[in-house]
Structures are given as C-alpha cells and as structure tokens.
Image: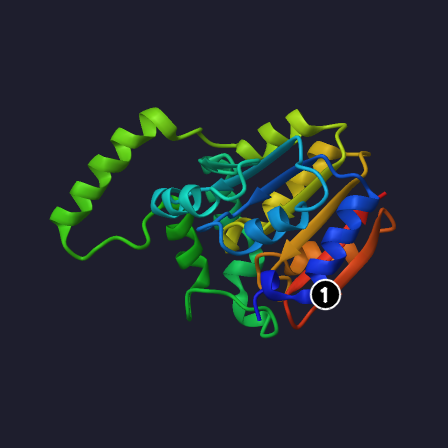
Amino acid sequence: MYMSDDKNLQSLLKQTIQEKEITHVLETGTFQGKGSTRMVAEAFLGYRDPEKFVTIEANYLSWIKAVENLKPYPFVTPVWGLSLNRAEAIKFVEDDEMLKNADKYPDVYCDGGENPHQFYIKEIKGELGNSRFKILNKVYERKVKKEMKAHHKGDDLLVKYLKEMKGKRLLVLLDSAGGVGYLEFKKTIETLKDQSYLLILDDIHHVKHYRSYHDVKNSPDFTIVGENYTGGWVFAEKK
C-alpha cells in the first residue's frame, strides 16, 4: 500500500493540520502529483487554503504531468528543479558507506540490484532513463534545455524554501530520490534548527529514509504523531 492510500495517515494529517494551524507546506519528490502531494492538498479541503504550498520535482516530464494533475488544488505550486545542490548530492552518494556496503544491510531496501551505489550515482547525475535510441535522447535533451530557461528553478531548492518558510507553521514532507533522502533530512534539521514543525518521511524501510526514521525515533526533539513501518511512513512533530 502506498503511503498516500493509508486512511489512518489521511485522518491524522487532516486532524493535525487543523490542530497545529499549519499555514505552509514544503514537499520534495512530487512525481506526478497524484500521491502524497494530492493527499496533503486534500487534507486542507474544508479547512482553509495554506498560505504557501510548494512541491519540488526534479524530472521534467513528471513535473509537466504534476502541473496538470494538481490543477484542482490551485494553492499548490509544483516547482521544477533540484531539492539539493547537485555537486553536494553526488559527493554524498559517492561517499555514503551504507550504499557502498549495501550487502551489510539486508533489511534495508535499495534500488539498483547488485550495485545500488552506482545506480544512485547515475540517478543523481541524471544518467538513468535515457532511451536506447540516441536521436530520441537528443530531441528530448533539446526540448528540456529550451524549457529550462523558462521554467527550471535551479538547485538547492529545499534549503531555499525552508529559509523562506522559517518561523511559519510548517509541514515538511520528504520523499525525493532514494540515494539522497538522508541528506535532505539532515539539511532540513540543520536549516530549521530549533523551530517547531511537522515532518512526514516516506519509505522508512528504504535507504531513502531508514536512517532519518531512526534519528527521529531516537531523538528527544521529536514526538511521533503516527507511523506505519510496514506501510513505510512516519509522521512526527519537531518540538
């Protein structure tokens, strides 16, 4: 079951958004906008629109679809760009001991078969998903480059928007690329520091947020609002 299909989370989210009077939302990993983005948007229906709701997607084609799919929620702003600094993200994946030694963590799911380390390096460099037909790749690359001038918002967007929303009644949902989930989590902690906020992590049994989840569970600064380990999510409040 996908996190966005979990009725318990849907109920908790709606209740907590109203109790905490959440006014700002920041999400990474929009994909096509039909999963967690829509779930959070619908949690505001019947209450009041958030003052700002930004969701970040790195893939151009997914972003295009998300823009269309999220039209019923005009308060949601789908942003095309990178949540992290690309060079920093590549170095993080290259140096990550968990990815380099994935066989030592049999209970933690990784993508990429026998070599998740190389898989995630290629993913963050944008080398996955290309067509085998070079002419199609070139056509696609030309289109993306043209669109980037008008629509791409750059990189390091997670920190950018966290700083803009600092001091607000904030919900953060982290669900971006698997290899850099923990880096996103650490950036969130570092940027918001002592601020109170709500946090949702998806894929907590995956390398994406396995460590983030355990950091939250073991930190006196967080209170668990709800969790479903089998379903792969945790919902927490930073005090």
Quick one: SS at disc 1? helix
> Seen in the image, is 95 located left or right of residue 13?
left
Q: Crowding near pointer 1: few (<14 within 10 Å), some, many (20+)?
A: few
Residue at the spot 67% in from the left edge and 43% down from the top edge:
172
Residue at the spot 67% in from the left edge and 35% down from the top edge:
50
Residue at the spot 51% in from the left edge and 65% down from the top edge:
110
User: Would you place residue 201 above or below residue 49 in this image?
Assistant: below
**Kind of residue sitting beneath label 1:** Asn
> Seen in the image, is 147 located left or right of residue 200?
left
Image quarter for residue 27?
A: top right
> Seen in the image, is 143 located left or right of residue 50?
left
Q: Nearer the viewer, residue 127 or 146?
A: 146
Residue lying farthest to the left in this orientation:
135
Q: Give x and y (percent) for residue 204.
A: 64, 62
Q: Quadrant of the C terminus?
A: top right
Q: Give x and y (percent) for residue 150.
A: 34, 25
Q: How many marks?
A: 1
User: Would you place residue 143 above or below residue 7 in this image?
Assistant: above
From where the camera sits, is residue 215 visible? no
Q: Give x and y (percent) for residue 82.
A: 47, 37
From where the camera sits, is residue 31 visible? yes
Q: Which residue is mark 1?
A: 8
Q: Quadrant of the N terminus?
A: bottom right
Q: Nearer the viewer, residue 35 or 196?
A: 35
